Amino acid sequence: MVNIVGDSSSGKTLLAMEAAMQYGLRYPDRPIYYNETESAFDDAYAEALGMRMDRIVFPGEEYPDARMHVEGLFEDLDRRLSEIEDGGLYIVDSLDALSDTAELGRKIGDASMGGARKASKLSELFRRLVRRMEDRNLTLIVISQIRDNIGVAFGEKHKRSGGRAMDFYATQIIWLGERGKIKRVVDKVERQVGIKVQAHVKKNKVGRPFQKVEFPILFYYGIDDVSAAIQWLHGIGYDLSEFEIPEKRMDSYVRQLLYRGDRERVDDLRARITPILVEQWRSVEAKFQVRGKYHG
């Protein structure tokens, strides 16, 4: 289970879409479920990114309760786990939009312990389903909005709904934060065309925890992975001369290629630079490893 946490417009939904597209390419026979609980999914935008809408199952269209409350989410997950045999991807976007049946049944003015009740329901949901998810090889991505932690003088200034259940059961917790805006001027008109995002992995049970990485997101394109790779390799001093990238325009080089319509050059860069990136990343990580004290 992966929990993606972030403020509004920090790339949470886009990261989940990228995961869905990558999953679909790698596992063409496995189902992908997108439980859109916010009633804000933009089909045209998703298609512009390259999302294969015919590959995506939207549970809320068939079972409205799945995008209404936690109990409905549990029932739908239970239903999907009975359907799949060898893996699948289930995305919840977002957890904050889900209520619970007790909250839906009360009047607005009535006293409520909705937050505590919802957290308790989520904890029960994960306790009952986590082993079946593992047996069926189902990957669950849960998107959460951040909230201000009122009255905190030290420690975390932000929190997200779900209580401690998310912290306990998640394999990875990724916090996203906007670090800047990307703008472009065309015919003397300036427009924002993207954002710079930092991803902070606060929990990771399948790799090194507490890693941070920055990457640009371009609207209607997605994560600019090639630019991020170039910047990271340049940052560690890797010689990029073989790629013939002008150093003074390194930050915007890929964007200029995309705006010129030279996707072939970008795809060629991705194919050539990705193996180098993986090799160099692993080389750096290996230098941080410490041999276990119980190894001879």
Image (spheres, rainbow, N blue to C red):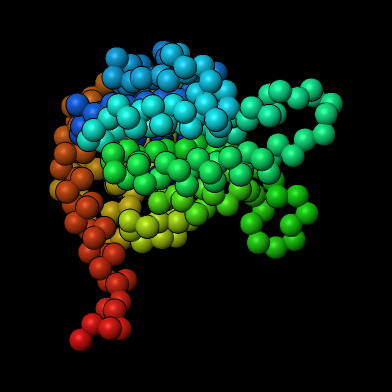
Above or below — where is 121 with respect to 156? Answer: above
Q: Is residue 161 above or below residue 101?
A: below
Give the percent coordinates (x, y) of residue 38.
56, 23
Give the residue at the far bottom of this rendering.
296
Point out the image quarter for the N terminus. Answer: top left
x%, y% of residue 184? 46, 27
Count up the numbered dots. 0
Q: Is residue 147 visible from the viewing direction of this image?
A: yes
Question: What residue appears at the point 75 percent right and 61 percent down from the top-left corner?
Answer: 153
Quarter of the image for residue 237 reads: bottom left
**Closer to the camera, 154 or 196?**
154
| Relative vertical location of residue 124 with respect to residue 204 in this rendering, above or below | above
> Can the viewer see residue 252?
no
What residue do we see at 32% from left, 71% from top? 288
Using residue 280 as the reference point, say whether residue 187 is left or right of it. right
Q: Residue at x 33, y 16 (%)?
A: 53
Residue 73: image location, x then y, percent = 49, 29
Q: Residue at x 30, y 26 (%)?
A: 83
Q: Is residue 161 left or right of residue 240?
A: right
Q: Where is the C terminus found, in terms of image quarters?
A: bottom left
- Quarter assignment of residue 120: top right
Compare residues 78 and 178 and report the one nearer the observer.
78
Image position, residue 261 (x, y; %): 27, 21
